[in-house]
Amino acid sequence: MTGRDLLELCSVSRDFGSFRAVDDVSFAVRTGSRHAVIGPNGAGKSTLFGLISGTLVATTGAVLVDGQDVTQLPVHRRVGLDVTTTFQHSSLFLRETVLENVLLAALRRGRSGLGGLRPVRARRAVIDRAHALLDQVGLPARHDVPAAALSHGERRQLEVAVALATEPRLLLLDEPAAGMSPAETARLTDLIAELPGEVTVLLIEHDLDMVFELADMVTVMHLGRHLTTGSPDEIRGSAAVQTAYLGTTEASS
Ligand code: ADP
Ligand code: MG
């Protein structure tokens, strides 16, 4: 499987009315890579993630996961293909406990063993795994509090645990460090770095230090377009990044 592309975007575009938010974007994400998408606000990054996760359907072009065309598939069918997103705006169940949030995600995955006639031992294994995930993301003492009681940073940690509970092959993280303190960001960076190698990560992030610490490939977007994809060394200081972030051509901010 090494070297194979888990995700391929083939000339995808997305219109909102007459406005083209994602414009003819093509790039591939290799299996097992830590691939970052960067670009200023409004570049089309979150819209692109919607096209990958299935919350949005491409106006034109194709999205392939493991060679299968998923362009028209709804979200729940893509979760069945092991594509999982954490959303930029938190989608936790705030009144449920931290542990229950992880268990609900495992249930959505459908392999959980919590349904119907499965043996008690299988349920125990799912619950044990949920506890282990919460320890892994750094929430060891918070399993039984409502998600509403968590700090902003802790909620992001829980979102990652919720995403991992679905056992994704492709994990989409949309600005996971948004609003986090430097210490929380460092902890999250370590967590992502330590994810199992078979989990492919596609990360949108504004914190370029985090991007260059984590990513083995970086895609730069600007005004809906794909500017370039390359190694962190190729991207650092590249003309494309300067164009996107410093407005050396048509960019205004
Ligand atoms: P990014 O995540 O890079 O900041 P977005 O994908 O959120 O960018 O947005 C790209 C552009 O598409 C922005 O100009 C935004 O206003 C527009 N856009 C995003 N979602 C919608 C929508 N649902 N309806 C209309 N315009 C949208
Ligand atoms: Mg966004």
Image (tube, helix red, strand yellow):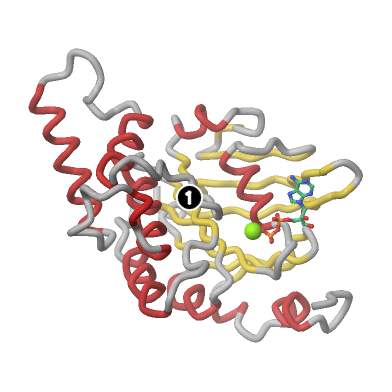
Q: Nearer the viewer, residue 207 or 9?
A: 207
- Residue beneath the point at 82% across and 43% down: 16
In-image side of 107 versus 19 (left or right) = left
Q: Quadrant of residue 130?
A: top left
Farthest residue to the top: give it.
117
Q: Nearer the viewer, residue 111 or 152?
A: 152
- Write down the residue under mark 1: 86
Q: Position of residue 196 (x, y in %)?
A: 30, 56
- Residue beneath the point at 60% across and 79% down: 234
Q: Position of residue 180 (x, y in %)?
A: 45, 71
Kind of residue at disc 1:
Thr
In-image side of 195 versus 142 (left or right) = right
Query: Is 141 situated above or below 80?
Result: below
Q: How many marks?
A: 1
- Residue beneath the point at 59% across and 28% down: 74
Q: Is mark 1 within 8 Å of ligand 2?
A: no
Farthest residue to the right: give it.
18
Query: Is 186 situated above or below 69?
Result: below
Query: Is 207 situated above or below 88?
Result: below
Q: Secondary structure at mark 1?
A: strand
In-image side of 142 versus 168 (left or right) = left
Q: 10 Å neighbourhood of mark 1: few (<14), some, or many (≥20)?
A: many
- Residue beneath the point at 60% across and 43% down: 52
Q: Position of residue 4 (x, y in %)?
A: 48, 49
Q: Position of residue 144 (x, y in %)?
A: 21, 47
Farthest residue to the left: give it.
121
Q: Nearer the viewer, residue 93 or 199?
A: 93
Query: Which quadrant of the rendered structure holds the C terminus?
Result: bottom right
